Amino acid sequence: MTGIIASIIDGVLVGSVYGLAAMGLTLIWGVMDVVNLTHGSMIVAGMFGLYLLTEFVGLNPYAALPPVLVGGFLVGLALYWVSVHRMIGRPPLMSLLSTFSVNLVLIGIGTAVWGTVLFNVQVTLPGVSWGRYTFPGTHILAAVLTAVIALCLYLFLHRTRPGKAIRAVAGNRTAAELVGIPTTRVLSFAFGLGVALACVSGMLIATLFPFTLLSGDTYQLKSFVVTVLGGLGNPAGALMGGIALGLVEGLVTPFMPVSWTLVIEFALFVVVLIVRPGGVFTFRRS
Amino acid sequence: MLRRPFFWIIALVIAVFALAPVVSGSVQLRESLLLASIYIILASNLNLMLGYAGYVNFGSIVFFGLGGYICVYLLGAPGWPLAAATLAAGVVVSVLALFFGLGILRLRGAYFALSTIGVNEAVQAFVANFAPWGGSSGLYLSSALFAPLGGPMRALWIIYFFLVGIMGLSLYLSYGIKISKFGLGLLAIGQNEDAASVLGVPTPLYKALAYSASAFLPALAGGLYFFKSAFIQPADAFDLTFSLEAIVIVMLGGQGTIAGPAIGAYFYEEMRGWLLTSDTFSNFQLVAAGALLLLIVQFLPSGLMGWVYGRWPQVRKVLE
């Protein structure tokens, strides 16, 4: 029994990081109605960012967070202008196809350069023991950092002018433009922010598990599941959704081979979409 | 239908595909036309969702792979004959798609697109763990299975003719749907789903039917394709590249048209051949396909056929 509880707690710790990834996806969706299909490759970009910064620059893994955040933001800005800007206001089909194609280009270049071998970043942190079980320090620190970043994001969106501008554009783009908010700048900023969150979550995931260039697909699917659990366009819900997904993973792992989790998560995704398409953790909008 | 010129154009294309390798006796030509047929099958069935109803299906290869798996499995241990196994694969995949579609297609645009990406990942993960289908190592067929078709050499020709037939059926299916009331409903959904629904188009049912219809022929083609290679494994059966290529072909040729996917398949096949033989680019096939898709989406969203229609409007009467 304690084994199951330990597995659930560990699942929740890891799940919060999935929540962070999904926050990036859902922020972009909420602000500009674009599903960012480069999300998976941006998670992988964060992973490789960590790998390159620790391996070749010799940074401490957690000191790599600020450069990955800033780098992710800049990459996000570039992606906005390349793939999304011309698609704003066009049918959703077009922005899906356009971000999908950019994703393929990025993955294609990545596989040609690095191949699909397994990478691993060694991070040693003392764990916390509980009876016979030890929670790895990396998992705890990742969850703590996620909480801090989520809090910062909340404060940014609710307490600062640019954050309020983002929320205004998400609420009603035309009205925001009428009151003098530069919407194009806000959209590109929000896209950059969303991508930066994806990169940071990828970086944190890379401190937990080994990864390949194609890991993005799995984590992208997890992000979709989390986003749908939390309700598309709802960052607070995304964190709750991530924790819920981690809980499910923790609950399932003691009973089933790990390779089945993707099937179960997808089944969950379909069931939630059909039963509660608005999301499980949707709160009244303030 | 018989009085329309386009019907006979399709018939001509099928005849050329069927006869060209026989007349020239070239196996190389047959193999390249076989690949072209598969591209056309995948693209024109994807077009039913993407072009008509405006719903992008990122996992269209699931139908192909699942059809292949069901067919190869039935041919192996239960020992079904080829025709029965292939048809069973088509029917099973279509019915699965209908049920899945009825559930998922009540949802709009982005949600549906997300679920189709998930379908591919989840089905692949399921098959890789499913012991009766050989898990991640896949299923093999014994070469003795080619004997009822008159040996491997003749079997390859027979498979080719069947695939060309399926390609023809795909084109006629696209055409038949387009000129039917059902097709009109789908096109209405593609333009404005709310308006279509208000005007009495049963949108969830129509979308699910289109999804299911777009599953049948690719499943048949998958069955034959993997019978031909006598081997199937999850990585080949659910190769995302095929899904991507089908999307590129539809967008390149012109979404919503029937000739578009066929012409797109031809151009894509040419480009791919050139990329694979060029030393610099052989590693960058995915990059080139992605970049091509990006350019089409940004600058030529109605594809080659859209451009032709804009330039020579009278073409619309002949090539649909």
Image: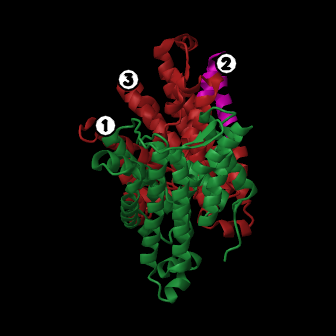
Chain colours: A green, B red
Q: Residue at x 57, y 13 (%)?
A: B145
Which numbered disc, 2 or 3, marks the residue that appears first in the sequence?
A: 3
| Nearer to the camera, A176 or B160 | A176
A86 inside magenta stretch: no
- Contact check, label 3 and label 1, Cβ < 8 Å: no
Q: Where is residue A270 in the image (x, y as percent from the top left)?
A: 68, 49
Q: What main secondary structure does the magenta stretch of the protein show?
A: helix
Which SS class for mark 2?
loop
Q: How far apart are marks 1 and 2 (CA)?
A: 38 Å
Kind of residue at disc 2 = Trp
Which segment did they paint magenta?
A: B69-95
Which chain is home to disc 2? Answer: B
Task: Indicate the quadrant containing the N terminus of chain A: top left, top right, bottom left or bottom right.
Answer: top right
Q: Where is residue B172 in the image (x, y as percent from the top left)?
A: 58, 44
One can see residue B246 in this view:
no
Q: Would you identify the image quadrant in which residue A243 lies?
A: bottom right
Residue corresponding to mark 1: B276
Which numbered disc, 1 or 2, marks the residue that appears first in the sequence?
A: 2
Q: Residues within 10 Å of mark 3 (few under 14, many from 20)?
A: few
Which SS class for mark 1?
helix
Which numbered disc, 3 or 1, marks the residue that appears first in the sequence?
A: 3
| Nearer to the camera, A172 or B89 | A172
The tag on residue B27 is 3
Which SS class for mark 3?
helix
Q: How far apart are marks 3 and 1 (CA)?
A: 20 Å
Residue corresponding to mark 2: B80
Q: Would you identify the image quadrant in which residue B265 lies?
A: top left
Q: Where is residue A59 in the image (x, y as percent from the top left)?
A: 33, 51
